[in-house]
Image: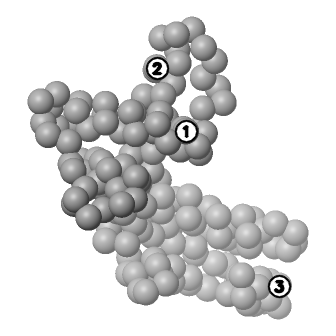
Amino acid sequence: QEKVATLVQALNERPGLQLNVPAVFNRAADEPTLREAGLQARVVAARKAELAAKKKPVDAVTFASVGAEPEVYQRLLTAIYRQEYGKDAPLPEPPPEATDPAARITLLEDGLRQRVQVTDAEFFALAKARAEGVQTALLTGTGIDPGRVFLTAPAEGKADESGVVMEMALQ
């Protein structure tokens, strides 16, 4: 927010300046998030299919609502795991010393995340959404002319310990 405020101030003080907001992604930094989103989408789709087959409403199904029912969530994960690895594939077993009942769920999730394929289109969509979020923050309630703030084409960029780095360019 501080960086956005600094950019807004610079744009307001210099009406001739324009700003390029890069649509950047970083495969290493963004892939875990996209894999998680893919897993969550599969779980929601499976729950909706299950409810639709019973002629029950599906509009309110979200990942949070499925996760709120641990038995349903584990059953769905197990079904998806069997689809991915084969119906006769052994399910991952927690070590005998594991006392947390969620240990099996964690193992199922980990195995399924590894099977989620992240496409270039998903990286590009994330980069675009990230840049649009910055653009919206720069333009909302600031009086800056939208014609002065441009989005660049999606491209791979750098990441540091805080996440993907967006290097803005004032012109």
The residue under label 1 is 69
114 is higher (above) or lower (below) than 143 = above
The residue under label 2 is 50
In three-dimensional space, the C-alpha distance between marks 1 and 3, rounded to whole angstroms, equals 50 Å
Left-right relation of 139 to 107: right
Circle 1 — which element?
Answer: loop
Comparing marks 3 and 2, which lies closer to the viewer? 2
For the N terminus, the quadrant is bottom right
Give the residue at x 72% y 88%. 2
Question: Callout 3, which amino acid?
Answer: Asn
Foreground pick, 170 / 160: 160
> Mark 1 vs mark 3: which is more N-terminal?
3
2 is higher (above) or lower (below) than 102 = below
How many dots with numbers?
A: 3
In three-dimensional space, the C-alpha distance between marks 1 and 2, rounded to whole angstroms, equals 14 Å
Question: Callout 2, which amino acid?
Answer: Glu
> Mark 3 vs mark 2: which is more N-terminal?
3
Is the residue under label 2 in contact with that under label 3 (CB below 8 Å)? no
Give the residue at x 40% y 52%. 101
> Mark 1 vs mark 2: which is more N-terminal?
2
The residue under label 3 is 12
Comparing marks 1 and 2, which lies closer to the viewer? 1
Task: Where is residue 122? Give x, y as percent.
Answer: 40, 51
Kindly identify which numbered label has been placed on residue 81. none
In three-dimensional space, the C-alpha distance between marks 3 and 2, rounded to whole angstroms, equals 54 Å
Foreground pick, 161 / 88: 88
Give the residue at x 60% y 32%. 61
Give the residue at x 67% y 67%. 135
Question: Callout 1, which amino acid?
Answer: Glu
Circle 3 — which element?
Answer: helix
